[in-house]
Image (cartoon, rainbow, N blue to C red):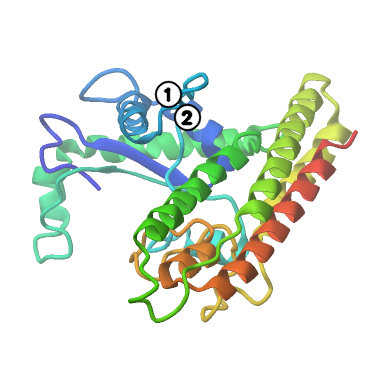
Amino acid sequence: YLNLDAAVTGPDFGCSGTPSLRDLVVEAAAEVPEPMKGGSIAGPWEGRLKKAWADETPVPLDGPDAEFEPRLGALGSGSDYTVFVDHLGIPSISFGFRGKYGVYHSTYDNFRWMEKYGDPGFVYHAVAARFYALAAMRLAAAEVVPLSYGSYARALSEHLDELRRRVIRERRTFDQRKAAKPALVADFGPVVAALEELEAAGEAADRAAAEAVAREDAAAAGRVNAALLAVERGFLSSDGLPGRPWFKNLVWAPGLTTGYAAWPFPELAEAVENGDSELFAKGAERAAAALTEVASRLRTAAKR
């Protein structure tokens, strides 16, 4: 979304997507110039992410501080990527320039507004085209498809930790005397263990992809490509999510109460939202199985 004051300050670049595409996004954004502020469009974007990380990430007192690395926002619904992520399990990205946009869905939300106020000269439309073209060219020309899974589990772990903290906070204030049902029983252990397995498998797959390119081994590159392209379909369930079978991804889905915003680990999020221990146990089992399946596919990619 373009900023009303684009001609003066420039709008802010923002990007969401599945974590496997993070490196592609970061590298492409770093090479696209920011026409108003100077530098690249990656600079302000990473600056905002780092500020949010510094403000919100818990500080460890008994060990080294965490290191910042840019993360893509989670994809939920409301745009063209929905069918690819939620139904087909295909890595996707969504990006745009956002800021003040007071005419959204009004009679003033038209070409004239965009031409005169939103993006005079259509400067940021051109920047968007450059970013898309660069990302597409790198996807098309890569010897091994640029999907990186080494950091995927860490990104998912951050989302899972948010749920774990929410359960703890709600348990602190739970009053059995006033509750219609017992407190939520939530065992995150199987999902945490599956994420550890996924992290190791993702790092091995990344190494295998890099080695195939370095050796100029066409056969190995073809095998790695075929495996990587099928990886995220391992997150899909044939019967989909409870009450909405079209949404088949067990790791990414729009929330039932969040509009378009995502619910990472949607079954677990729904169970926490409703205090449903039975749904949580089922969701944890299914999420762990999906993560294990994806780890297995990544190990296939890593085989020599």
Dot 1 lies on which element? loop
In this rendering, position of residue 40 left or right of residue 181: left
Question: Residue 89: image x %, image y %?
Answer: 62, 59
Tag 1 near tag 2, CB within 8 Å? yes
**Residue 30, disc:** 1
Farthest-out residue, right: 304
Residue 70 locus on image (x, y percent): 45, 31
* x 19%, y 32%: residue: 10
What amino acid does circle 1 point to? Ala
Pointer 2 residue: 26
The answer to whether residue 47 is above or below residue 127 is above
Q: Tag 2, which secondary structure? A: helix
Q: Residue at x 86, y 34 (%)?
A: 220
Q: CA distance from mark 1 to mark 2?
A: 6 Å
Q: On the picture, is 2 further left or further right than 246?
A: left
Q: Nearer the viewer, residue 290 or 142?
A: 290
Residue 53 image-quadrant placement: top left
Query: Which image quadrant for residue 35?
Result: top left
Q: Position of residue 4 (x, y in %)?
A: 12, 43
Q: Residues within 10 Å of mark 1 (few under 14, many from 20)?
A: some
